[in-house]
């Protein structure tokens, strides 16, 4: 496994691999790797000749400086955990990824203004900025993203739809711990006591899914809000039942080919997100 830190070196590597007619799978990460990331890498390895993983904590997607500072980082441990799953780990500096200050604004057709975007202004512009940059540098055939960050996946697909990049986006199911909590780099920030309470989010999602055959989106949403209101450990930021493509909230399941319930909540001052498909035609 190679460790590469510069754009010129990774471009050279990719160019050579493509000259050998090798397919390239790319998994972008911000480090603090867990089983969810490993699932992405395993699928990329199974489907490609070459796998590249990037580790880069992107400053432009944090609207809270303190959140950026406390984001867990352990690059050496991360690299050791994936050495059997990828061929190259790209670990650029901030200066390498942003040689000049960019104020570019992306038109995401409103996909960035709801849910996460409503509470984290500028977040998705920063996400798209770094993904756009990675796709320019690493001309991969396939890029792998987890469904836990559902809104992010929808937005990245929108970026690719512009035709600027030829990469194909592959989504991988959310990986969960034994008690149902979705793997997240932020889980390590939970105290031991609060960690035991964290599966409440997934339990709520499952119960909501069981109601989809008999209740309206409005009634399910109302029930979810009430459940979080009764649980003093959590502070619900949002719960939304949305169309899986437009991300618009729906009033009737018949309006949508696929409906997804997305939740963001604070536990122990740690922000957790999760989602679950409620309905699909």
Image: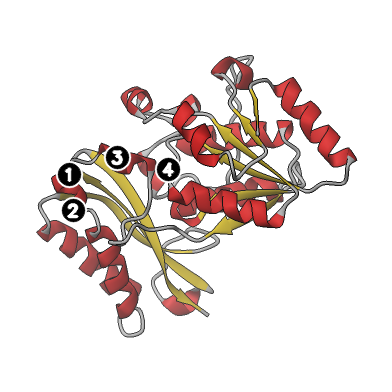
Numbered mark located on residue 188 in the image: 3
Does 125 sit above or below residue 205?
above
Residue 148 image position (x, y, % from top left): 44, 54
Marks 4 and 2: CB-CB under 8 Å? no
> Given this view, does label 3 or label 4 mark the residue nearer the observer?
3
Please rate how many residues cluster around mark 4, counting C-alpha atoms within 10 Å: few if below 14, some from 14 to 19, many from 20.
some
Q: Quadrant of residue 133?
A: top right
Q: Secondary structure at mark 4?
A: helix
* Distance from the alpha carbon under mark 4 to that under mark 1: 30 Å
Dividing the picture into quarters, in which one does residue 220 lie? bottom left
**Residue at (38, 46) in percent of width and height:** 184
Residue at the spot 45% in from the left edge and 45% down from the top edge: 113
Q: CA distance from mark 4 to mark 2?
A: 29 Å
What residue sits right under mark 1 in the picture? 192
Looking at marks 2 and 3 on the same chain, the residue that comes earlier in the sequence is marked by: 3
Q: Earlier in the sequence, mark 4 or mark 2?
A: 4
Residue at which label 4 appears: 117
Does residue 11 appear anywhere in the picture? yes
Left or right: residue 247 versus residue 262 is right
Q: Earlier in the sequence, mark 3 or mark 4?
A: 4
Q: Quadrant of the N terminus?
A: top right
**Looking at this rendering, what residue extends furthest in the bottom direction?**
214
Helix, strand or loop at label 1? It is: helix
Total residue callouts: 4
Callout 1–callout 2 Cβ contact below 8 Å = yes
Q: Secondary structure at mark 2?
A: helix
């Amino acid at each position: 496994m190679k460790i590469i830190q510069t754009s010129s070196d990774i471009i050279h590597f990719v160019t050579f691999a493509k000259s050998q007619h090798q397919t390239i799978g790319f998994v972008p990460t911000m480090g603090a790797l867990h089983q969810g990331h490993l699932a992405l890498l395993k699928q990329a390895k199974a489907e490609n000749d070459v796998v590249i993983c990037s580790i880069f904590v992107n400053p432009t997607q944090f609207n809270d400086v303190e959140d950026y500072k406390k984001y867990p980082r352990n690059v050496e441990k991360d690299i050791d955990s994936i050495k059997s799953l990828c061929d190259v780990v790209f670990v650029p500096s901030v200066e390498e990824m942003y040689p000049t200050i960019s104020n570019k604004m992306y038109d995401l057709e409103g996909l960035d203004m709801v849910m996460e975007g409503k509470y984290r202004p500028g977040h998705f512009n920063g996400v798209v900025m770094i993904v756009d940059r990675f796709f320019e540098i690493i001309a991969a055939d396939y890029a792998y993203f987890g469904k836990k960050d559902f809104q992010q996946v929808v937005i990245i697909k929108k970026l690719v739809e512009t035709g600027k990049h030829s990469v194909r986006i592959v989504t991988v199911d959310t990986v969960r711990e034994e008690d149902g909590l979705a793997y997240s780099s932020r889980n390590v920030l939970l105290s031991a006591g609060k960690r035991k309470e964290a599966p409440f989010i997934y339990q709520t999602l499952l119960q909501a899914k069981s109601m989809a055959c008999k209740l309206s989106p409005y009634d399910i949403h109302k029930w979810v809000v009430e459940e979080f209101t009764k649980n003093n450990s959590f502070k619900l930021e949002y719960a939304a039942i949305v169309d899986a493509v437009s991300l618009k909230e729906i009033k009737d399941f018949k309006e949508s080919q696929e409906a997804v319930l997305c939740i963001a909540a604070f536990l122990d001052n740690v922000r957790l997100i999760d989602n679950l498909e409620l309905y699909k035609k």
